[in-house]
Image: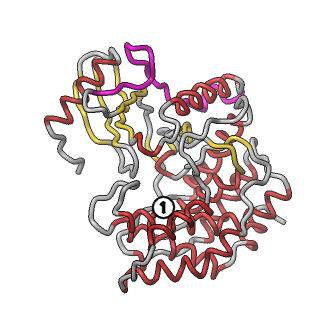
Amino acid sequence: MAPVLTEDVQGTINRVIAQYGLGSVLSVAQEGSGVIHKTYRVDTAQGSFICQQLNTSIFGSGLYALEFNYERYVSAFSATPELKGEWIVPAWQKATSGGYFFSDTDGSSWRVYGYIEGKTLPAVGEKSHLEQYAIGLSKIHFVLKHFEGQPQPAIPQFHDLPFYYDEYMKALGTQVPRKENCHCVKTISDGISLALSVRTDINPCTIHGDPKTGNVILNDKGKAIAFIDLDTFMYASKLLDIADSVRSIANTAGEAPEDDSRVAFDKDSCEVFLHSYYTAPTYGLSKREESELASVLLMIPFELGLRFYTDYLRGDTYFAVDYQEQNLHRAMCQFRLFEDMRRKGLQGIVNKAFRR
């Protein structure tokens, strides 16, 4: 059941929508379960829109980078006519002030874009969902090949494992971990050398940066038609996107399981996804990228687990939580996935998926 919105939230959204000249608000509902921004679906007299309250604290260069990257993405899409009719770029709206963003009286920042009819990809889905997820990722990579220059880094040190590890060590300090934290501390200690040895700078290009299942839209025919959340464009290896996608769909317990003991790596889902990406018309990995993919696949859940645990130690200042130890639980889930992937081995799965 969607949470009931307070009068204050309703009033704020009415003010935001008025600033975009989108007519009277007919209904508002909270959308999704994002851990960074607050997102609402708003039906107005002029149509349906997504209205987001942005967590601006994560953006090192303010909102300029978001606007710069979005407009370059729109231009890149216009240079790919072969995807016309099968790929959608979220239509960011401009406020009456002329910019994409609106600052409310309380200092909060908002943006609005057209609602895309469809559904987000289930975290644990059918084979057809996995195939479409991979095809969708290959399509956005194809569009981003036409991105002019390099994207502006909106989030400082994103996917920067050495930085994340330094921040973890600062947060850990002289704390003596409680019993329930010891597994996280031991996993980090045992895995950090391996994770830091992974190359993530191979053939850098513009990538999405956060292609988890919740950022993919399927239409009523089950076809991937769009990626949303365009805040994480970055200049790095495509392997990061592929690995984060696998992390998102190859956990048998789902993306956000309630019980971390149920977490296990689904080799079959991983293989289906990788093979579908490999055979997509817009596929493009070099032999070197293929040879390094297994190590990046393993590094990504470790990196995310490290980030969740660090935020837990700091008092949950980055990722939104619904209860006190949620980030600890999230970290445990990612570390268990990392451990199971390590046990089962990945190079053989990659070789089979690429039919070598």
Which image quarter holds the C terminus?
A: bottom right
x 66%, y 65%: residue: 297
Q: Residue furthest bottom?
A: 179
Q: Quadrant of residue 70?
A: top right
Residue type indicated by callout 1? Val
Q: Is residue 305 visible?
A: no
Q: Is residue 68 above or below residue 220?
A: above
Return the x and y of residue 237 as percentages of the image width and height: 72, 51
* Front residue of this view, candidates 130 and 112: 112
Instruction: Look at the image and say whether residue 87 sits in the magenta stretch.
Output: yes
From where the camera sits, is residue 145 visible? yes
Q: Is residue 188 above or below residue 238?
A: below
Q: Report helix, strand or loop for mark 1.
A: loop
In this picture, residue 308 sits left or right of residue 157: left
Which of 217 and 261 lies nearest the eye of the viewer? 261
Principal SS element in the magenta part?
loop
Which residue corresponds to the image point at 68% horizontal and 27% vertical from the top-left?
Answer: 76
Q: Position of residue 144 (x, y in %)?
A: 69, 36
**Frontmost residue, 93 versus 154:** 154
- Image quarter for residue 308? bottom left
Residue at position x 55%, y 33% from top? 65
Q: Which residues are magenta?
A: 82-104
Give how far across and how far down residue 330 sits, in percent: 42, 67
Q: Residues within 10 Å of mark 1 (few under 14, many from 20)?
A: some
Q: Pointer 1: what residue? A: 124
Name the outermost residue toward the front.
174
Residue 192 among those drawn in magenta: no
